[in-house]
Image (tube, rainbow, N blue to C red):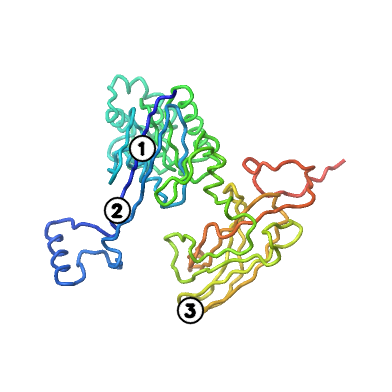
């Protein structure tokens, strides 16, 4: 039986919303005295919602998990699911509120760009510092440093203070250090998204190699399902601080993307859908409905008609609609935008019907991410409301122009272009 490297039992982490302590004793006394008199806290940031102060939020709520030696585990979930919190606890950056963690070996981790580096030190000096933190001797680091520098592709800049590095350079050096220094467990949290595509592939190959040849345990967090597929042999899906799936990679991705529950629907209630934090909330989309289908299955030969219902939450001018089409595996397909929908007043409710021609889509399952937005003076979009997975649909045609070849979305993309003309 494989050796257990990580054992997590009933792990919980609680935060207080808005609970920020004063930086000095004077500030603490000022806050206490204001509260005593029923006054506003003079040390709270402007715009703080005082109704939320003191409320608790469980970032993790009862995680139980084991990871074996040499296992490559993918951890996926929507933003706020608890992924980064769990990895910070495993890396001993923060402490759990409840529960126990058993670690069998040393850990190297990359949780954020630049984590573990001192800006005033050079790249070379930071390599030695990270090795020393792991308990390695200077002689052991000397034996690996050339290999680290070569992998990082930063030899020309290795004796430059890292505060002058770009975010991509930070990632290259950080991964090179994490991959080559002696540790039994490697933790990676989405940071590879900063690097270029060639270096991402190089990193994935290196993680797979160290797992297979050195029996190193890998924990990998990413929103890129293709990299999860390429690297991982097991997936854990987190949702609101709990594990909702633990097992096969493809089944875990399907669980994360919600394919099981959303198939064959034509009406999607969006009132309780999660919204990102960077929207203005000047509009609120209530629902989206397919008009000419009872199954949510369409032919690519006919337009897809759908209607959105929404309410203006403020006076807003020059509103636009857009949708991003993505394959069910989360691969982006394309972007479609509307003309100016007009101006709207507070509490005005309205509906809009659009048509989308799916003739370039291959057979398969897709979803729309939809948004209402405005444009600023520079032409940048300002999101009024946004729902990432608003509705699911399926393209299923009675014929195909590729001789019934199964379409491999993971490798080929989703758009089926017309046949090439052959010149004789």
Residue drawn at (50%, 63%) of the image = 386
Residue at image mark 1: 8
Residue drawn at (62%, 42%) of the image = 410
Looking at the rendering, in which quadrant would you find the N terminus? top left
Residue 348 shown left or right of residue 291 in the figure: left
**Front tag of 1 and 2:** 1
In the depicted structure, whether residue 95 falls above or below residue 54: above
**Front tag of 2 and 3:** 2
Q: Nearer the viewer, residue 232 or 415?
A: 232
Marking on residue 347: 3
**Front tag of 3 and 1:** 1
Marking on residue 15: 2
How far is mark 1 from mark 2, CA to CA?
Answer: 20 Å
Whichever of callouts 1 and 2 sits on the residue coming sooner in the sequence is 1
Residue 109 shown left or right of residue 245 in the figure: left
How far across and down, in percent of the image, does residue 45 sit?
Answer: 26, 64
In the depicted structure, whether residue 10 falls above or below residue 4: below
Whichever of callouts 2 and 3 sits on the residue coming sooner in the sequence is 2
How far across and down, in percent of the image, does residue 261 sit?
Answer: 57, 53
How far across and down, in percent of the image, does residue 30 sit?
Answer: 14, 64
Most distant residue in the right direction? 424
């Amino acid at each position: 039986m494989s050796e257990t490297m990580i054992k997590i039992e009933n792990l919980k982490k609680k935060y207080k919303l808005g609970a920020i302590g004063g930086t000095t004793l004077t500030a603490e006394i000022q806050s206490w005295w204001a509260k005593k008199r029923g006054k506003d806290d003079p040390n709270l940031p402007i715009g703080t919602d005082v109704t939320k102060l003191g409320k608790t939020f469980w970032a993790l709520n009862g995680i139980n998990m084991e990871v074996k030696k040499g296992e490559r585990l993918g951890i996926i979930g929507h933003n706020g699911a608890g992924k980064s919190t769990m990895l910070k606890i495993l890396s001993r950056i923060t402490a759990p509120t409840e529960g126990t963690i058993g670690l069998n070996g040393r850990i190297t981790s990359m949780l954020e760009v630049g984590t573990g580096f001192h800006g005033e030190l050079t790249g070379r000096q930071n390599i030695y510092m990270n090795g020393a933190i792991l308990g390695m001797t200077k002689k052991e680091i000397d034996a690996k440093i050339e290999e680290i520098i070569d992998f990082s592709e930063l030899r020309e800049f290795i004796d430059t203070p890292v505060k002058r590095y770009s975010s991509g350079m930070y990632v290259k050096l950080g991964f090179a250090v994490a991959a080559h220094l002696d540790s039994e467990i490697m933790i990676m949290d989405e940071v590879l998204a900063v690097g270029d595509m060639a270096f991402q592939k190089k990193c994935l190959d290196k993680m797979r190699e160290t797992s297979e040849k050195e029996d190193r345990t890998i924990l990998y967090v990413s929103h890129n399902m293709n990299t999860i597929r390429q690297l991982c042999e097991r997936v854990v899906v987190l949702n609101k601080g709990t594990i909702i799936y633990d097992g096969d990679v493809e089944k875990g991705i399907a669980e994360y993307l919600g394919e099981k529950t959303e198939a064959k629907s034509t009406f999607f209630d969006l009132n309780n859908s999660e919204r990102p934090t960077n929207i203005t909330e000047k509009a609120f989309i209530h629902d989206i409905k397919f008009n000419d289908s009872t199954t949510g299955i369409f032919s690519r030969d006919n337009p897809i008609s759908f209607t959105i219902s929404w309410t203006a939450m403020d006076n807003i001018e020059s509103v636009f609609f857009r949708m991003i089409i993505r394959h069910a595996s989360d691969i982006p397909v394309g972007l479609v935008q509307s003309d100016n929908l007009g101006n709207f007043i507070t509490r005005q409710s309205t509906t809009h019907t659009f048509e989308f021609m799916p003739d370039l889509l291959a057979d398969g399952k897709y979803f729309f991410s939809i948004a209402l937005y405005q444009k600023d003076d520079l032409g940048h979009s300002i999101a009024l409301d946004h729902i990432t997975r608003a509705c699911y649909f399926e393209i299923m045609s009675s014929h195909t122009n590729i001789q019934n070849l199964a379409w491999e979305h993971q490798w080929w993309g989703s758009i089926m272009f017309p046949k090439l003309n052959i010149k004789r």
